Image (cartoon, rainbow, N blue to C red):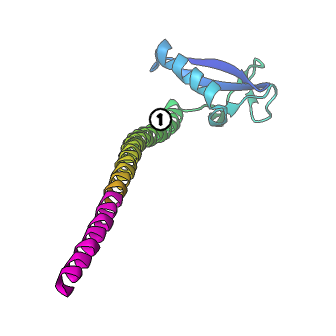
Amino acid sequence: MNVENLDAIVDGEVLTNQLLNNERNDAIAASILESTIENPREWINQKESDPSDSMNETNETIQQPSDIVCENDVTVTSCEMCQNYELNLTKMQDEERNLKEQLSAAQHLVNRYQQELSGERLYRKEMETKTTTLCADNEKEVNIAKIENENCAKQLTIVDERFNFLSDL
């Protein structure tokens, strides 16, 4: 069993992932190392002189089983993180899409209301102008009718006077 140490330095600490070469290829190893950089808490901090490490007869450090990180554990955690990230991203994108649709609908509604309001204002001005014109025309007609009525009243008075004069005779 061949063990390969891949180290990543994050915030001044050395993070170690020990990979078993017999089941992993370089792409997977690189992917796992990248995840150590992105998720340093998921990996074991390697210290220069760890008292839990045993020394064999040739003064080589033998790693304890607690120092070996299983790829499946990290992959599951990374996948959960990725799934949570993707889920949150999808939710946010859906919310953004919904908000954009609502904004678009609101803008369309505002534009429609502004057009209706402009049309209503124009209609009111036209009606005010027509009403003012009709009012002036009616006042002229009333004044003309009043004058004619006064003339008729005068002529009636004259006719009454003549009738009374002729009836007295």
Count the numbered circles shown: 1
Q: In percent of the image, x 62 and y 32: which residue is there? A: 39
Which of the two residues, 13 or 138, is positioned nearer the viewer here? 138
Callout 1 amino acid: Cys
Residue 152 located within the stretch drawn in magenta: yes
Q: Is residue 85 above or below residue 130?
A: above
The spot of residue 104 in percent (x, y) is 40, 38
Q: Residue furthest top?
A: 26
Residue 81 located within the stretch drawn in magenta: no
Predominant SS of the magenta segment: helix
Q: Residue furthest bottom?
A: 168
Q: Residue furthest front?
A: 169
In the image, is 144 to the left or to the right of 41? left
Q: In percent of the image, x 68 and y 20: which residue is there? A: 8
Label 1 Cα crowd, 10 Å radius (few <14 / some 14-19 / many 20+): some
Q: Which corner quadrant of the image does residue 115 belong to? A: top left
Q: Which residues are magenta?
A: 143-169
In the image, is 166 to the left or to the right of 71? left
- Give the labeled residue for mark 1: 79
Which of the two residues, 64 or 33, is positioned nearer the viewer here? 33
Which of the two residues, 108 or 137, is positioned nearer the viewer here? 137
Q: Is residue 21 above or below residue 84?
A: above
The spot of residue 149 in percent (x, y) is 29, 66
Q: Could you tell me if residue 45 is visible in this image?
A: yes
Q: Is residue 25 above or below residue 79?
A: above
The spot of residue 116 in percent (x, y) is 36, 45
